[in-house]
Image: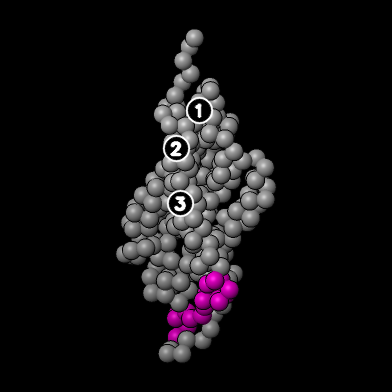
């Protein structure tokens, strides 16, 4: 993934100002959460646009809703999801190998700016996708998935983004774990050598957008779940870059 393993020659950051990016992305995340929370019709409108109503076979009541989401259980989507789900694990294996390769090549000077960026990516995956998204938000947010709400053929009440008042008990809708993984994959484009950023970065960017989009089209998540999950990984990545920028080795004064 890297062209060189030059040890810290000076205190540099190839990502500009990580702290400024972190603050800007954090503010954007909070503003979007507020928007989706105050205007839940955004989520409902998008979900309705990909949901097809159908007669309920067991009742004639107008209060019951039956139907399906346009691409739920679509064979192509199932195949694409299986492929894209494997990509974060492949990237994780590569990122874990890079510090070891650097240590074998440079010995005590193994820690370089690029290795710090690699470690920042690993930590952002663990803390963002792992801890915040899957172990906290999806476990305790209580927000039912679209296909589990009574508006789209399920049994649970709809709750807006950011509300913890829903009755989902586990693996809930807020936020999307796959969207979070997709956002993390996009961050890895910045770790690629410049000559590989276009040929590898363009497909990664497409996949990064495609993964959360598929979750919305299949009724697995609302738009807000996908957008906020995706953006959260960018927030965490810039947060970890900021930490490593602050605590990276400083050049010794002559």
Report the residue at 44% width, 46% height from top.
96
Residue 3 located left or right of residue 85: right
Who's the residue at 33% across and 58% down the image? Answer: 139
Residue 236: % across, % down: 46, 42
**Nearer-N-terminus badge (3/2):** 3
Task: Decide: few, some or many residues near mark 2? Use Cα within 10 Å; few <14, some 14-19, many ≥20.
Answer: few
Secondary structure under the numbered disc 1 in the rendered image: loop
| Mark-to-mark CA distance, 3 and 2 | 17 Å
Instruction: State the residue position of label 2.
Output: 104
- How far separated are the C-alphas under marks 1 and 3? 23 Å
In the image, residue 21 lies at what x, y percent? 54, 35
Pick out the residue farthest to the top: 254
Residue position for label 3? 93
Q: Which mark is residue 87?
A: none
For marks 2 and 1, the one nearer the N-term is: 1
Boundaries of the magenta span: 60-79
Q: Quadrant of the N terminus?
A: top right
Are the residues at dot 3 and dot 2 in contact (C-beta closer than 8 Å)? no
Q: Confirm whether residue 35 shows in the render.
A: no
Q: CA distance from mark 2 to mark 1?
A: 13 Å
Residue 12 visible in the snapshot: yes
* Image position of 2 with respect to 247: above or below: below
Secondary structure, magenta segment, majority class? loop
């Amino acid at each position: 993934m890297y062209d060189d393993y030059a040890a810290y020659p000076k205190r540099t950051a190839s990502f500009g100002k990580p702290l400024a990016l972190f603050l800007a992305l954090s503010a954007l995340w909070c503003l979007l959460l507020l928007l989706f929370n105050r205007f839940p019709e955004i989520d409902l409108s998008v979900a309705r646009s990909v949901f097809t109503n159908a007669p309920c076979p067991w009742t004639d009541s107008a209060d019951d809703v039956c139907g399906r989401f346009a691409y739920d259980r679509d064979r192509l989507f199932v195949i694409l999801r299986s492929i894209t789900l494997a990509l974060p694990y492949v990237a994780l294996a590569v990122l874990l190998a890079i510090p070891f390769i650097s240590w074998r090549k440079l010995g005590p000077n193994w820690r370089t700016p690029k290795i710090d960026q690699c470690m920042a990516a690993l930590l952002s995956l663990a803390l963002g996708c792992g801890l915040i998204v899957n172990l906290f938000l999806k476990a305790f947010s209580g927000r039912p998935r679209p296909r589990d709400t009574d508006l789209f053929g399920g049994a649970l009440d709809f709750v807006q983004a950011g509300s913890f008042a829903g009755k989902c008990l586990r693996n809930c809708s807020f936020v999307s774990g796959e969207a979070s993984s997709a956002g993390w994959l996009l961050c890895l484009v910045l770790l690629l050598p410049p000559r590989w950023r276009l040929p590898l970065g363009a497909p990664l960017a497409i996949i990064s957008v495609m993964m959360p989009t598929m979750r919305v089209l299949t009724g697995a998540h609302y738009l807000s779940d996908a957008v906020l999950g995706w953006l959260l990984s960018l927030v965490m990545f810039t947060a970890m870059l900021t930490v490593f920028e602050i605590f990276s080795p400083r050049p010794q004064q002559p």
